[in-house]
């Protein structure tokens, strides 16, 4: 009996010794892209896009919205989708040395003094500065996003601003350090006023801001009639404004 028990114990010990150990999983190193595009921290605002390993510059793309609305922004709303071709054109034109990211706001409206999209954009810019310190940023915005772009044009770290068919309202602080600005508006726009955009161009030029003012004849607010011209003009402007030596051919 003792001999059989000892033999059984030895077999059990052998089986136990052959049991594979569970490997210890080391935490994965977070990439710049995962840090920049992480969904947390914005209260519902979200960055999406392309971030290379070592970007030398970044383009922040801003969509339009409404004067007042607390409705949540979704990825499939027309104002958001309208900026996808711009992001694609910028990525192709600027190559893999430049990150191109799109911001979706928490809510659809500007909402008076709350200026919700400005709050979201400054949150995004703060994250960009934290993850990519010292990297120059160009801001491209349409409609309400154009108003946001003009509002943050004088903020630290902004290298260039492109405002497309912007909603111009109130006094706008002009950048004073020579950063270039593109203002582009269709002459047939009935949603936002091209005359106000022309007035901003005139006033900022008087302050010494290097403004490029482009009036697109017959174009409406959606930027669809001459879409290629809009995409190419913005990409060419941003390419010339950002200090990136090697660009895509």
Image (spheres, rainbow, N blue to C red):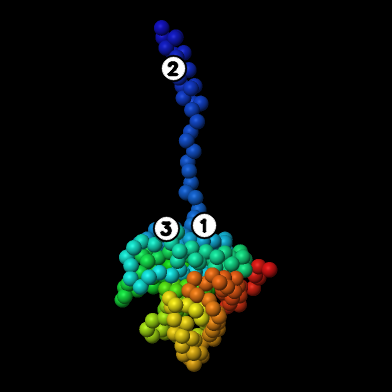
Q: Which quadrant does the N terminus fall into?
A: top left
Q: CA distance from mark 2 to mark 3?
A: 54 Å
Q: Secondary structure at mark 2?
A: helix
Q: CA distance from mark 1 to mark 2?
A: 50 Å
Q: What label does residue 164 carry, if any?
A: none
* Residue 166, percent from left and from top: 45, 77
* Residue 149, percent from left and from top: 45, 76
Q: Is disc 2 in contact with disc 3, using a CB cutoff of under 8 Å?
A: no
Quarter occupied by residue 213: bottom right
Q: Vertically, is 60 above or below 184?
A: above
Q: What label does residue 31 carry, if any?
A: 1
Q: Vertically, is 2 above or below 97?
A: above
Residue 101 visible, this orientation: no
Q: Earlier in the sequence, mark 1 or mark 2?
A: 2
Q: Earlier in the sequence, mark 2 or mark 3?
A: 2
Q: Residue at x 45, y 14 (%)?
A: 8
Q: Secondary structure at mark 1?
A: loop
- Name the residue tied to disc 3: 39
Q: Residue at x 37, y 66 (%)?
A: 108
Quarter occupied by residue 53: bottom right
Q: Does residue 115 appear to the left or right of 145 in the view shown?
A: left
Residue 124 visible, this orientation: yes
- Name the residue tied to disc 2: 9
Q: Residue furthest bottom?
A: 206
Q: Residues within 10 Å of mark 1 (few under 14, many from 20)?
A: few
């Amino acid at each position: 009996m003792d001999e059989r028990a000892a033999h059984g114990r030895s077999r059990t010990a052998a089986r136990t010794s052959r049991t594979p150990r569970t490997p210890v999983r080391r935490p994965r190193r977070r990439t710049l892209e995962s840090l920049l595009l992480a969904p947390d921290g914005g209260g519902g605002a979200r960055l999406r896009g392309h971030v290379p390993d070592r970007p030398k510059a970044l383009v922040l793309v801003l969509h339009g919205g409404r004067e007042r609305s607390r409705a949540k922004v979704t990825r499939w709303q027309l104002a958001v989708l309208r900026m996808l071709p711009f992001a694609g054109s910028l990525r192709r034109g600027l190559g893999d040395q430049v990150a191109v990211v799109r911001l979706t706001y928490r809510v659809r409206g500007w909402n008076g003094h709350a200026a919700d999209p400005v709050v979201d954009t400054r949150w995004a810019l703060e994250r960009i500065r934290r993850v990519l310190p010292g990297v120059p940023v160009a801001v491209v915005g349409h409609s309400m996003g154009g108003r946001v772009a003009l509002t943050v044009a004088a903020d630290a770290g902004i290298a260039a601003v492109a405002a497309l068919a912007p909603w111009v309202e109130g006094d706008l602080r002009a950048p004073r350090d020579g950063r270039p600005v593109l203002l582009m508006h269709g002459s047939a726009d009935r949603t936002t006023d091209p005359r106000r955009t022309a007035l901003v161009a005139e006033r900022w030029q008087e302050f010494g801001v290097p403004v490029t003012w482009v009036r697109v004849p017959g174009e409406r607010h959606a930027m669809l009639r001459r879409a290629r011209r809009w995409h190419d003009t913005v990409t060419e402007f941003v390419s010339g404004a950002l200090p990136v030596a090697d660009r895509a051919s």
